[in-house]
Image: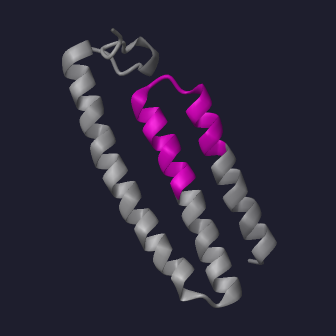
Amino acid sequence: MTGPLLLGVSNALFCLGVYGLLTRRHAIGLLLSVELMLNAAALNFVIFGRAYGDAQAQAFTLFIIALAACEAVVGLAIVVQLVRSANTILADQVDLLKG
């Protein structure tokens, strides 16, 4: 596959993530959308790292993958706590932090 085609795939993944983030109401759907956006950014780093022969971009991709794993763990822990306390996973119904 060529570079511009892969950049188009990465752009499409990122746009799908943004669309999912703006339209989803479930907290798990929001987490999946953020994961999709992080994967698109990682794909972008791999594409540019390969195009310019720079190993630092591909090493930075490993940090993005680690960040995505940490985000998934913390996000799912928050979802479990919301289900226990608010009995819902809908993000717009949670008002526990309102004063």
> Residue 65: horizontal and vertical position, in percent?
42, 64
* Residue 75 quadrant: top left
> Residue 22: horizontal and vertical position, in percent?
61, 30
> Residue 41: horizontal and vertical position, in percent?
59, 61
Picture residue at 76% right of the left edge, 61% below the top: 8
* Furthest-front residue in this view: 99
- In front here: 67 or 35? 67
Picture residue at 32% right of the left edge, 17% below the top: 97
Q: In which quarter of the image is the N terminus?
A: bottom right
Is residue 56 shown above or below 5? below
> Residue 95: horizontal and vertical position, in percent?
36, 12
- In front here: 55 or 7? 55
The residue stretch that appears in magenta = 16-38
Picture residue at 76% right of the left edge, 76% below the top: 3
* Furthest-right residue in this view: 4
Q: Main secondary structure of the magenta part?
A: helix
